[in-house]
Image: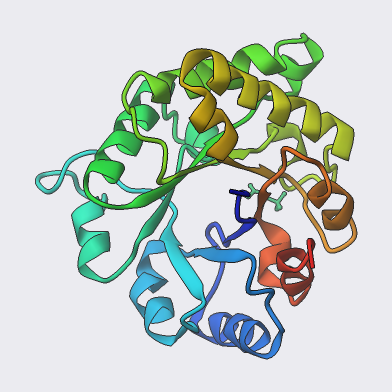
Amino acid sequence: MGRKFVVGGNWKMNGSKAMIGDILKFLKEGQLNSETEVILGVPAIYLDYVKSSVPANIEVAAQNCYKVDKGAFTGEISPLMLKDIGINWVILGHSERRQIFGESDELIAEKVAFALENGLKVIACIGETLEEREAGQTEEVVCRQTQAIAEKITDWSNVVLAYEPVWAIGTGKTATPEEAQTVHKAIREFFAKNVSADVANSIRIQYGGSVSGATCKELGKQPDIDGFLVGGASLKPEFVDIVNARA
Ligand SMILES: O=C(CO)COP(=O)(O)O
């Protein structure tokens, strides 16, 4: 069976009630391809609000959650809380969490495992920095990040992997379709070798990093690119074009 195209909009720390109103308007008015799964990554404070007003064909994700169910962890939210308000998805390991908030491969892997155990679906993010790419370490880095998760989970059916090269995030510098495809293929080979042929075939791998209405079509044609994780452009009407990249 083919892998269903999956496009996430990661709003990051953006939005207001007024802005969310505008975003939901263009999403409701736009003709979203029903063959594409659409997931909005929403700031925690707006999750309930968005969940209550989003059309049924759009899923809502948190942008982070912690690795235990409750307790003295000021400022954190748990997978159980997300499930409690009807949220089914979480983005984990985004490069901004890794770089700005110092999250390690191991912590991210623990969060992925705990979120899955509690019935969430996970978009797990990986990707190399510019320095790592220039040092020829891209594949080594993304495999190391994936391996950390593979050590903590066995069932990948509720995981989407997002390959987001750090140098392409928010820079307007999209990876070329060939650059992205090369890494996506390497990740799939990692799964074939270290997890199973079945997971290698079935896991969906999104590309993220300056995806726009202009770049999405060519990227979306690559055989190992199964969708996108979109930052800046997910706040704008062109997000509809990105959702429909394969249409
Ligand atoms: O980080 C990203 C999505 O998670 C990508 O952000 P941009 O699309 O703004 O480059």
Please state the horizontal and vertical placement of residue 142, each as a whole percent of the image.
60, 22
Q: How many marks?
A: 0
Point out the residue furthest to the left here: 71
State which quarter of the image contains the C terminus: bottom right
Point out the residue furthest to the front here: 1
Instruction: Tell me the residue at 83%/47% (across/down).
Output: 219
Seen from the viewer's position, the closer of residues 43 and 183 is 183
Instruction: Tell me the residue at 33%/28% (across/down).
Output: 153
Please state the horizontal and vertical placement of residue 86, each as a whole percent of the image.
28, 70
Left or right: 19 with respect to 245? left
Say if residue 173 shows up in the picture: yes
Seen from the viewer's position, the closer of residues 174 and 45 is 174
Please state the horizontal and vertical placement of residue 29, each as a whole percent of the image.
68, 90
Please state the horizontal and vertical placement of residue 221, each as a whole percent of the image.
84, 49
Instruction: Tell me the residue at 40%/25% (across/down).
Output: 149
Instruction: Tell me the residue at 52%/40% (across/down).
Output: 94
Classify 107 as above or below 235: above
Seen from the viewer's position, the closer of residues 126 and 190 is 190
Say if residue 66 shows up in the picture: no
Classify 94 as above or below 30: above
Left or right: 64 with respect to 203? left
Colour mode? Answer: rainbow
